[in-house]
């Protein structure tokens, strides 16, 4: 793992971010002590429709109409009277 001081981070932020995006982890030090870590963001796990289509197979919940009726029927703008 690479360690860089705060000054180097300020001077080379773009280059350090490119390295982190490529998978490298960088520790930022302040006065020689580790202060923070720059790590790559985990990629999002995109799923195709075919992967999740099975979640929507089957009959609807038979209690749905009753549950829906329990909710207030009128929608109102909470800021309208403000």
Image (spheres, helix red, strand yellow):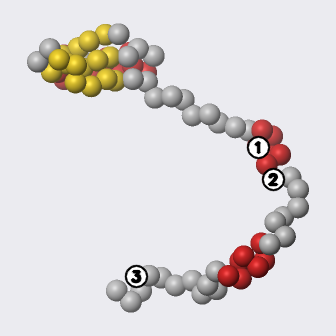
Q: CA distance from mark 3 to mark 2?
A: 36 Å
Q: Which residue is mark 2?
A: 56
The residue located at (71%, 82%) in the rendering is 69
- In x, y percent, where is residue 34? 22, 19
Of the two numbered discs 3 and 2 in the rendering, the one whose residue sits closer to the viewer:
2
Which residue lies most toward the bottom here?
81
Q: Is residue 58 left or right of residue 9?
A: right
Marks 1 and 2: in contact by CB < 8 Å?
yes
Along the viewing direction, whichever of 65 and 79 lies nearer the viewer: 65
Residue tagged 1:
52
Q: Answer few, some or many: residues within 10 Å of disc 2's Cα (few below 14, many 20 plus, some between 14 and 19).
A: few
Residue at 43% across / 24% down in the picture? 40
Q: Residue at x 81, y 66 (%)?
A: 61
Q: Quadrant of residue 30?
A: top left
The residue pinned by badge 3 equals 79
Closer to the chain start, of discs 3 and 2, is: 2
Q: Quadrant of residue 27?
A: top left
Q: Position of residue 72 (x, y in %)?
A: 61, 84
Compared across the picture, whether 49 is left or right of 29 comes to right
Residue 50 vs 72, above or below: the answer is: above
Q: In this image, 74 relative to 42: left or right?
A: right
77 relative position to 65: left or right: left
Spatial CA distance of label 3 from label 1 is: 38 Å
């Amino acid at each position: 793992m690479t360690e860089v001081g705060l000054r180097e981070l300020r001077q080379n932020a773009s280059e350090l971010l490119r390295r982190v995006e490529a998978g490298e982890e960088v520790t930022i030090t302040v006065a020689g002590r580790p202060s923070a870590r720059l790590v790559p963001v985990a990629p999002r796990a995109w799923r195709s429709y075919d992967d999740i289509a099975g979640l929507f197979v089957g009959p609807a919940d038979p209690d749905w109409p009753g549950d829906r009726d329990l909710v207030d029927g009128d929608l109102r703008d909470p800021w309208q009277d403000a």
